[in-house]
Image (cartoon, grey):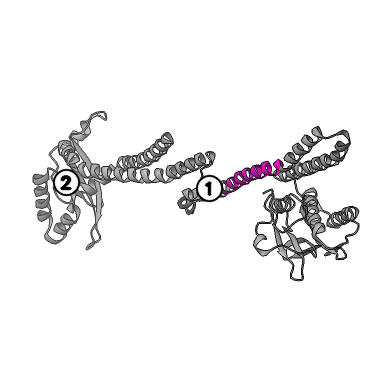
Amino acid sequence: MRSLFWRIFASFWLAIALVAGLSMLLGRALNQDAWILSQHPALDGVAETWTSRYEEQGADAAQAFLERLRKTSRVNVQVLDDNGQPLVKGTFPPRAAAFEARQHNDRRLPWRRLTTDYSSPLSGATYLFIYRIPHPELAAWHRDSLFWPLSALTIALIVLTLFSLLLTLSITRPLDRLRGAVYDLGQTAYQQNSLARLANRRDELGVLARDFNRMGARLQGLIGSQRQLLRDVSHELRSPLARLRVALALAERAEPGEREDLWPRLARECDRLEALIGEILALARLDADPGAAQPVDLAALLRKLQEDAQLDTPEQRVEIELQPGVNLHGWPDMLERALDNLLRNALRFNPAGQPIELKAERQADELCLSVRDHGPGVAAEYLTRLGEPFFRAPEQSKPGHGLGLAIARRAAERHGGRLELNNHPAGGFSASLLLPLKPQTDK
């Protein structure tokens, strides 16, 4: 993480510093004459002052101004008109033009020659100003003038450094928090509020933190539910195993005739244990990948459930009510197991002579698959806990392991829906699977 910090910091800093430095160097290289003309203090206002003197006071006053300029700043000036003719004598040294002509191209002249034009606001005439600044004077001025550019460059580098530091920290600090959250999640000590501030950001890192929070919450929930399920399974398996152990101990001590009476008890305990293990495996399989969703034939599914219920309990009557034109995408086997568990619960508590209502109807954008019996219902304080693995309401005396509703709830969640359990206003108990009609991805 620290190497990433310095890489990002150095990249930002070098990129911005190189761009700024190259911009300044390129600007000076391309506009060096213009830069000297605009920044040299001896040339400041020369064109305006000379033009005013020449047009208002005459050539002598203009020539005197140039003489004073040469004495004070050692800058020589010549002024030409539109035709290239000198308007005043100027202050160029004698034979300066001949000296320039004799110099070879590879030898530097002892002065720097600069030219600029100026248009008079009074007469409209245009004058060409030619300046010659000795190199020693220009070098001395460069040394003095570099203080401010260097100061400005230093300030710019400080600002760029702070900017790069803040920009780098804005990237690496959230990554460091995410790294810590990943470590905590691996140690099962993850706290969602550890990324609360990061999740409030309105950028990609905030989106990542929110997604990580959801993933962490889901993983913690799954880990917690698996731990609770393991504890519940261990507890539930003790009872049939203990009964089997007692029955075996009795069978070992019993006479041959008495053993014949114990074998049915042993068989019942084995059947209970096998049923319990089957339900536990069914609940665990719901967390596996079910594959792609497919269209569900609701009519065939409900008829199959009705036929199975009548074979198991011929004295009970199951009535089907299917709303026409309702389509669902999902996993038929999962839905069949969930509805079968709801229907078996209803069959255990429904009194003889009263029908069990199995409905499939559309409610807004959801499909409601409900099973309603006419039994005693469940006390209101236990409704919220129904659906937890191995939980059974205290007043329920019918046999069961408390896994049927848990399987139905998990199946509904895998379809992107939910399980609602309520006491029916007209009496009895109602269990409903509310599933979205649009295809859902795996949860």
Please tell me which residue lies in front, 163 or 442: 442
Please give the name of the residue rendered at 40% of the width and 41% of the height, measured from the top-left corner. Answer: 12
Q: Main secondary structure of the magenta part?
A: helix
Q: Please tell me whether residue 365 is drawn above or below residue 222 in the rendered image.
A: below
Q: Disc 1 residue type?
A: Leu
Q: Position of residue 337 (x, y in %)?
A: 79, 50
Tell whether 89 sits left or right of 21.
Answer: left
Q: Give the CA distance from mark 2 to mark 1.
A: 69 Å
Residue at the disc numbered 2: 77
Where residue 54 sits, quadrant-wise, is: bottom left
Q: Specify start and end residues of the magenta stretch as a single range.
A: 217-238
Q: Quadrant of residue 91?
A: top left
Give neighbour class at mark 2: few <14, some 14-19, many 20+ (Cα, 10 Å).
many
Work out whether mark 2 precedes mark 1 in sequence or the reverse, and give the earlier one.
2
161 magenta-colored: no
Camera-nearest label, 2 or 1: 1
Which residue lies under the disc numbered 1? 208
Q: Which of the 4 quarters of the picture holds residue 153? A: top left
Q: Residue at x 90, y 56 (%)?
A: 310
Is residue 417 shown left or right of residue 268?
left
Disc 2 marks a residue whose amino acid type is Val
Q: Are marks 2 and 1 in contact (CB under 8 Å)?
A: no
Q: Is residue 194 above or below residue 110?
A: below
Q: Magenta stretch: residue 227 in it?
A: yes
Residue 14 horizontal/vertical position (percent): 37, 38
Residue at 18% from the left image edge and 35% from the top image edge: 98
